[in-house]
Image (tube, grey):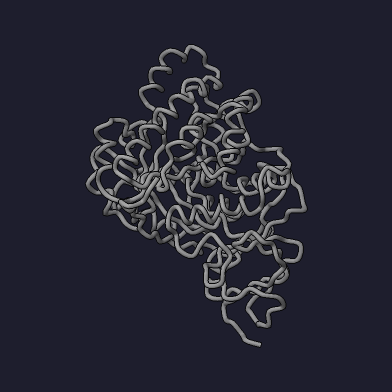
């Protein structure tokens, strides 16, 4: 028997292999890596965990979150967000630049990395935000997962809605560009016409599906013109899915949120402003088109767009209420519940929430359970059902749009870099998250689409 120091042995879990096959295996972890998978492994480790009856999945990589630090810590910070992540099976996250100060240069990125390194239980990466004044710096900020462009639904320096500026950003460099695709001019025009109705449901009419389609078309056109790596954030409409079926190139990816899969405009009746987000909730027809887009590979993965606001802030009357919902704690159970109900397979869920994200952002050795890969793992219980309860949430905002939903697939153990950080309601260690590394993605000029 070999002794492994600082190691972990998971016994008898139902392991999801990269092929999609499920097999009862032991998994040996040492120094943050998966070093062996097999039956009845003969090894002595610092900790052995009986995973009988649980399913072992790659840790979720959430590619779009707003964790509010620095500057807005009353809504969330890296400590509370990290706990919310690992409770939801999220072992890595990519965070957005709309903090105070904005993440728009090397100094502000360095500050975020230092803060997360001191506080976060999950691994972390950050976007740099595009503005009118930092275009020449966007390629030189490292380590960075990509450039975030708010084409609409934003105020201040991060709003980049002028064609000339968008063209300059797409034309220069090779770094991934992720866009919030809503057309600001159409939103402004419709807001002036429709705001006589103060009900929050009007939000989905002001920022309608045409506003989303116009911006997505513009971004795709620029991506095709410059053969530039493009990612479309939180795509929300049937119109966009249909458009991408025709024009999506191999270097273009798109994501969808659980909110846009599971909620629609009917939610305003029960949730009011808690249902308000950008882009807004859509119709039942859009829900179904998004699901079909996922299954067909038009949409590549899931992101939560975790954007917490306090209940006091959300209680303000529309349109003074802020847009955004929390989501890192419920995304995996929601998707696994959909799997149990027959909407998708376990392999698809894992690909959408782990493997495809790692591939899109070129994050090495994550997103699959393989020998030699990083030990970012989650053990879930697919046999027990439990209602979402705000009293059990770790996010500072303390609420969920899915409160009361009966779900299965809740994480029982979450492992980050080989350490058990979440154990059935208990957080065992602090700040075990590490900065993510990103390989370059270059669109080859010979690539066909």
- Relative vertical location of residue 205 with respect to residue 225 in this rendering, above or below: above
Query: Image quarter for residue 442?
Result: bottom left
Question: Which of 426 and 52 lies nearest the eye of the viewer?
Answer: 52
Residue 347, position in %: x, y? 63, 54
Residue 288, position in %: x, y? 61, 33
Residue 352, position in %: x, y? 56, 50
- Relative vertical location of residue 163 with respect to residue 135 in this rendering, above or below: above
Query: Image quarter for residue 416?
Result: bottom right
Q: Is residue 360 left or right of residue 176?
A: right
Question: Which of 218 and 448 lies nearest the eye of the viewer?
Answer: 448
- Relative vertical location of residue 200 with respect to residue 257 in this rendering, above or below: above
Q: Residue at x 32, y 31 (%)?
A: 161
Q: Quadrant of the N terminus?
A: bottom right
- Relative vertical location of residue 252 with respect to residue 424 in this rendering, above or below: above
Q: Is residue 253 left or right of residue 107?
A: right
Residue 247: in sight, yes or no?
yes
Instruction: Name the outermost residue toward the bottom.
Output: 1
Residue 99: in sight, yes or no?
no
Q: Residue at x 43, y 60 (%)?
A: 436
Q: Is residue 268 left or right of residue 180?
A: right
Residue 392, position in %: x, y? 67, 47
Question: Which of 153 and 163 lies nearest the eye of the viewer?
Answer: 163
Q: Residue at x 42, y 17 (%)?
A: 190
Number of marks in the rendered image: 0
Q: Quadrant of the C terminus?
A: top left
């Amino acid at each position: 028997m070999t002794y492994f120091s600082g190691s972990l042995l998971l016994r008898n879990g139902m392991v999801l292999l990269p092929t999609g096959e499920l097999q009862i295996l032991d998994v040996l972890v040492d120094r943050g890596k998966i070093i062996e998978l097999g039956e009845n492994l003969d090894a002595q480790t610092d900790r052995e965990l009986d995973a009988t009856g649980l399913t072992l999945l790659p840790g979720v990589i959430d590619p779009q979150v707003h964790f509010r630090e620095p500057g807005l810590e009353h809504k969330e910070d890296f400590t509370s967000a990290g706990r919310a992540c690992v409770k939801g099976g999220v072992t890595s996250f990519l965070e957005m630049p709309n903090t105070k100060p904005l993440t728009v240069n090397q100094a502000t990125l360095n500050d975020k990395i230092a803060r997360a390194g001191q506080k976060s239980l999950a691994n972390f990466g950050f976007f740099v935000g595009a503005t009118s004044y930092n275009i020449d710096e966007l390629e030189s900020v490292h380590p960075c997962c990509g450039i975030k462009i708010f084409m609409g639904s934003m105020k201040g320096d991060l709003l980049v809605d002028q064609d000339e500026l968008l063209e300059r950003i797409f034309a220069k460099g090779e770094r991934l560009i992720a866009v919030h695709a809503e057309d600001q001019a159409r939103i402004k025009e419709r807001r002036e016409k429709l705001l006589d109705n103060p009900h929050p449901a009007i939000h989905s009419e002001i920022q309608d599906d045409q506003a989303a389609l116009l911006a997505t078309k513009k971004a795709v056109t620029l991506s095709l013109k410059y053969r530039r790596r493009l990612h479309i954030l939180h795509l929300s409409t049937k119109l966009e899915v249909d458009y991408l079926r025709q024009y999506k190139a191999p270097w273009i990816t798109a994501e969808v949120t659980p909110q846009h899969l599971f909620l629609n405009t009917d939610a305003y009746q029960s949730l009011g402003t808690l249902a308000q987000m950008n882009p807004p909730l859509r119709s039942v027809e859009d829900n179904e088109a998004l699901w079909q887009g996922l299954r067909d590979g038009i949409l590549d993965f899931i992101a939560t767009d975790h954007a917490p606001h306090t209940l006091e802030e959300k209680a303000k009357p529309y349109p003074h209420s802020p847009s955004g919902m929390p989501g890192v704690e419920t995304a995996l159970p929601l998707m696994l519940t959909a799997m149990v109900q027959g909407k998708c397979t376990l392999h698809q869920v894992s690909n959408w929430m782990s493997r495809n994200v790692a591939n899109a952002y070129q994050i090495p050795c994550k997103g699959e359970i393989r020998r030699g890969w990083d030990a970012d793992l989650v053990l879930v219980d697919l046999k027990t059902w439990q209602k979402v309860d705000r009293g059990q949430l770790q996010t500072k905002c303390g609420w969920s749009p899915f409160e009361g939903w009966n779900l299965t697939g809740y994480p029982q153990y979450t492992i980050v870099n080989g350490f058990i950080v979440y154990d059935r309601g208990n957080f065992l260690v602090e700040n075990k998250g590490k900065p993510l590394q990103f390989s370059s993605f270059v669109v080859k000029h010979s690539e066909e689409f």
